[in-house]
Image: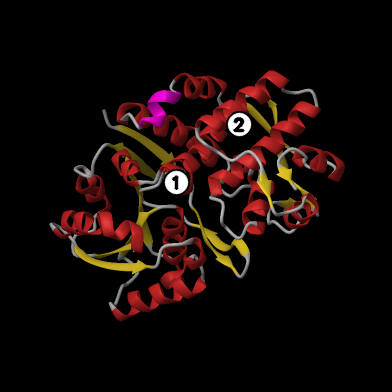
Amino acid sequence: MSRLINIKTSETEYYDIAIEKDFSNLLKFIEPLNLIGRKICIVSDSNVAKIYLETIKGILSEKYNVFSFVFEAGEENKNLDTVSDLYEYLILNKFDRKDYLLALGGGVVGDLTGYCAATYLRGIDFIQVPTSLLAQVDSSIGGKTGVDFRSYKNMVGAFHQPKLVYINVSTLNSLSKRQYNSGMGEVIKHGYIKDKSYYNWLLDNKAKIIEKDLETLEEMIYVSCYTKKLVVENDPKEQGERALLNFGHTLGHAIEKLMNFSLYHGECVVLGMIAALNISKAKGYITDEEIKQALLLFEDFEFPVTVKGITVNEVLEVSKSDKKMDKGRIKFIILQEVGNAVIDTNISDTELVASLKDIITA
Ligand code: GLY
């Protein structure tokens, strides 16, 4: 069964998130965008292009004037150099303001394509076709676009909403186990911050999620996207509630950077979530049992729960240079209970150090 979610971006505008098991309805969802006679540039990376570029080109070429731009896969290429190459490609091929980009790939492709779309000719429209679990439940939705700048992650960017997000859950079959599991970090996060019954559903359906049962994945991605929809519709530019989606990310991003991106994003978010759960427990909001249950769930998805080669002080220092700060204080997300996250700007260094004690090992 396909699923559909509408995300409202203004009083009169919205975009669809179509959740499907193949690409057969892609043209049907693109049709209302009125692209006849327009150019579409598919942007992808070298890994994803190998698997899906010809299929998507074939489908779109039935109706549209299709171009493609492929860059070398890897977070290290999510930068302004790749953006410049893409601008040049669009200029050489005379893309104008009514032409479209289509991001085919994971978070790196979606963020970079979205940023190019936000800035080329002061903004053109784009479509997201996310192929990783992380991109399907998180980065393709809500209009955050951007690239890394020097060693700063997502430091340059813009809010720019896609016109369509088309999710084919079968693409998750082409992910490595580690990539797939890493995306589960963001899925579990949605349960923790907003929806205890979803968290319990994840615990009950763990086996089917691990074996990638497509009906279960469709349901899971639907609920995760719906959770994100509710948050980003209320607070599209992260003035308040949207910061809850950063649960696990402040310390997680610092660990990701200090480990030179050798750990996946979701793996670092899980390490950050464990620290945040430790703080929530120290404040008496959640129980020891809930921490144990969390660790078992992370183990089921083979997440590392400790990390070596960096120090607690380094993590603290890098966290404080992250963009998620408020008047010089870390905007930290903790749980008041499972399914209910809050922003806390009063977490002390002592509390942060204690929360990382069992995670960062010598
Ligand atoms: N990934 C967090 C957000 O979209 O706000």
Residue at 66% over, 31% down: 341
Foreground residue, 98 or 282? 282
Residue 122 visible at all: yes
Residue 45 visible at all: no
Which disc, if any, is residue 179?
A: 1
Q: Is residue 25 left or right of residue 175?
A: left
From the viewer's perspective, is the residue at label 1 or at label 2 nearer?
A: 1
Residue at numbered disc 2:
193
Q: What span is in magenta? A: 206-211
Q: Earlier in the sequence, mark 1 or mark 2?
A: 1
In three-dimensional space, the C-alpha distance between marks 1 and 2, rounded to whole angstroms, equals 22 Å
For label 1, count other residues whose C-alpha is less than 10 Å away and answer few (under 14), some (14-19) or many (20+).
some
| Quadrant in the rendering for residue 331 | top right
Residue 224 % position (x, y): 46, 33
Q: Is residue 37 left or right of residue 110?
A: left
Residue kind at label 2, given as amino acid type: Ile
Quadrant placement of the N terminus: top left
* Most common SS among magenta residues: helix
